Amino acid sequence: MSSPSYSRMHRVNSIIKKVLAEEVEGLKDPRVDMVTITGVETSPDLRHALVYFSTIDLSRAGEIKKALDNAAPRLRRSLGGQVRMKYTPSLEFRLDEGIVEGEKIEAIFRRIHENDGEDE
């Protein structure tokens, strides 16, 4: 059974994710096209939030992170204006490693499939 604090943090993370996803979509920076906010982990004191993102073009992940970091003050202000919280958390952006791992696994399956075709 989940505790009330877990439920509350899950709800807070979900709301922050939704707001940031909408705000990132509205950014005019061409470096952040095709970016998806995949998750948020807020610290228990609500002062910091890790914001996970994914992109189709993993080769541009560093460039995208820089763009998101540059937009962080604007995104934080928007978040503070839309969500009433005791503190508006600072935002730290990270590439969602689950996507990267999924890409690696998919590449392995492709190689296995290609090798199986050669054996026949």
Image: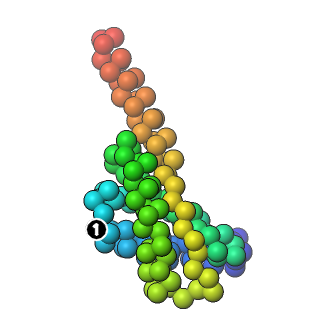
Q: Residues within 10 Å of mark 1 (few under 14, many from 20)?
A: few
**Image coordinates for residue 30, horizontal then vertical, percent:** 27, 59
Which residue is rendered at x = 54% and y = 88% of the image?
A: 84
Compared with 95, 20 (above or below) is below
Label 1's element? Answer: loop
**Image coordinates for residue 67, horizontal then vertical, percent:** 40, 59
Q: 85 or 60: nearer the eye? A: 60
Which residue is rendered at x = 49% and y = 52% of the image?
A: 96
Q: Which quadrant holds residue 66?
A: bottom left
Report whether 108 appears left or right of 9: left
**Image coordinates for residue 36, horizontal then vertical, percent:** 38, 60
Compared with 63, 15 (above or below) is below
Compared with 78, 38 (above or below) is above
Report whether 104 appears left or right of 33: right
Report whether 119 appears left or right of 38: left
Q: 71 or 5: nearer the eye? A: 71
Q: 96 or 116: nearer the eye? A: 96
Amino acid type at mark 1 = Lys
Pointer 1 residue: 28
Q: Which quadrant holds residue 29?
A: bottom left
Compared with 104, 17 (above or below) is below
Which residue is rendered at x = 48% and y = 73% of the image?
A: 73
Q: What colour scheme was applied to this rendering of the protein?
A: rainbow
Quarter holding the N terminus is bottom right
Q: 65 or 52: nearer the eye? A: 65
Quarter holding the C terminus is top left
Answer whether residue 7 is visible to the viewer in this image.
Answer: no
Answer whether residue 111 is visible to the viewer in this image.
Answer: yes
